Image (cartoon, rainbow, N blue to C red):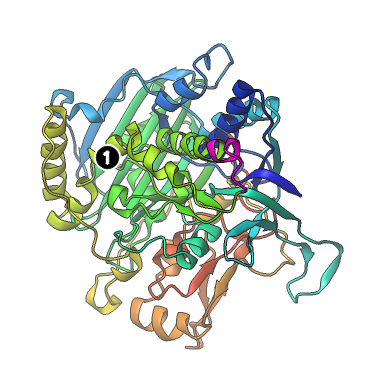
Amino acid sequence: MEYDVVIVGAGPAGLSAAIRLKQQAAEKGTEVSVCVLEKGSEVGAHILSGAVIDPIAMNELFPDWKERGAPLNVPVTEDKFLVLEADESYRIPNFLLPPLMNNHGNYIVSLGNVCRWLATQAEELGVEIYPGFAAAEVLYHPDGSVKGVATGDMGIAKDGSHKPEYARGMELHAKYTLIAEGVRGSLAKELQARFDLRDGVDPQKFGIGIKELWKVDPKQHKPGLVMHSQGWPLDSSTGGGSFLYHLDDNQVVVGFVVHLNYENPYLSPYDEFQRFKTHPAIRGTFEGGKRIAYGARAINEGGLQSIPKLTFPGGALIGCSAGFVNVPRIKGSHNAMKSGMLAAEAAFEALSAGRGGHDELANYPEKLRQSWVWDDLDKVRNIKPAISKFGLWGGTIYGGFDMWCHSLGIRLPWTFHHSKADNQTLKPADECDPIAYPKPDGKVSFDKLSSVFISNTNHEEDQPSHLRLKDTSVPVQLNWKVYAGPEQRFCPAGVYEYVGLEENQPRLQINAQNCVHCKTCDIKDPSQNINWVVPEGGGGPNYPNM
């Protein structure tokens, strides 16, 4: 199938790019063919975010978004920031927080529903969207430029044989291919390696965000409340924190982020989240309520220093495939949308100029540097590396100072850098203390498998595993013997399990059907022995209102 532009991923960046291309074509009275591939069963099925959205990009894409019925219905009415100790909490007065941390003017949303709405707008403009089709392979021209992508074959059994429903994947050729897979996408990883896009930039840094959606007692519901916390249950050497947002209809989203540069292999981000909800300052929100959805997703945290080269012959990286999250604000959707819009403008200019495609969209990075996205990230470029440099509390104090300087029009002349990739930070287990996590109570805290159940995760079991080990000896010889099997803890879905321990013959069992596509294993595995590739299209979680 031939298109002018193929976009991989129907998230905020991919859909905004598709819409902007069609808007420009309509303005110029020309035609441009645009296709969006989405590996989830529907648009929004794999979208997971906090999410408090800054509407700046939406205002530019659709100035009349309110009249069009965009699902930005809950404006932020109150900000709270807590510091937690084991049994105490302390609120930081709002006047001490840098203005950058103020959420007034923003909206609490389900980003999945925002993407579903964007998809309807895109289709009305003539964009072709194909959910349930996973882009599994990058296609190249003989000169090495990107030709497009191919979707994965369907109906292949675990042993590699073809099942009765076997269907060959499709090739989609394009003049320009925009990669909008989200964090740690498999095609983006391949392209960054093939075209050396990470040369000269800092390692990308990541966090894992784990989230639940609750229906709470109306007495506990405060529409528009945004609350963040730092501190307990994490120790002072581990970065992270919580978010708790009150939507409409007595719904509350609660989540926990752990920076993936943590050192203790016994740490379990999932269990830290469950423990967080039992804090006296938090628990009351959820008592008497019902948990209705669960999910997890990695987050780009490297910021400006970790953005790779954005273009390659025949296409570009947009959104979280490149990494535009503003870490202290815990926001990336506005920057993702704008990056997609700017890449679309660069592609449309190239098409309008009669360029045959397959060249580099060199003006896309330049447009980005001249945009408010660059300014948004430049203001906070030192915050995340400062935490690594000075520790959690020293880095937090420095971050407040740095952001206050920016608010006063002072740009500090130095830039801190990230030194290690997150897979390089674990200490051997014999240098660390095991962590005793409390047993879930089934009321506020829960076990992993019951959580995976409400993520509506489903994979066809008789298919090749999409979690590939480069060397099958590594899990036992390195991960188990040196790090006490950290993959069984850093995975928030019970995918990795060591069996045969009673016989003193440990073996890693991979329960790929549980995978919620968070990508943490691909990021945190110490020797980068786990390679996450796409399963059959339509597999994975099916997030409602997340």
Residue 256, given in percent of the width and then of the height, sits at 37, 45
| Image-quadrant location for residue 118 | top right
Height in image: 46 above or below 529? Answer: above
Q: Is residue 24 left or right of residue 360?
A: right
Q: Residue at x 50, y 39 (%)?
A: 346
10 Å crowding of disc 1: few (<14), some (14-19), many (20+): some
Query: In this orientation, which residue lies closer to the viewer: 145 or 269?
Result: 145
Which residue, given by chain and number where applicable, does mark 1 sit on? 328
Q: Is residue 546 visible?
A: no
Q: How many marks?
A: 1
Q: Is residue 242 left or right of residue 448?
A: left
Residue 204, given in percent of the width and then of the height, sits at 35, 57
Query: In this orientation, which residue lies closer to the viewer: 310 or 276?
Result: 310
Q: Residue at x 51, y 57 (%)?
A: 188
Q: Residue furthest right?
A: 164
Residue 206, given in percent of the width and then of the height, sits at 36, 55
Residue 382, given in percent of the width and then of the height, sits at 19, 47
Q: State yes or no: residue 350 in magenta.
A: yes
Give the residues drawn in magenta, as a range. Answer: 349-356
Q: Name which residue type carries label 1.
A: Pro
- Determine the secondary structure under disc 1: loop
Q: Is residue 178 left or right of residue 148?
A: left
Q: State yes or no: residue 383 in magenta.
A: no
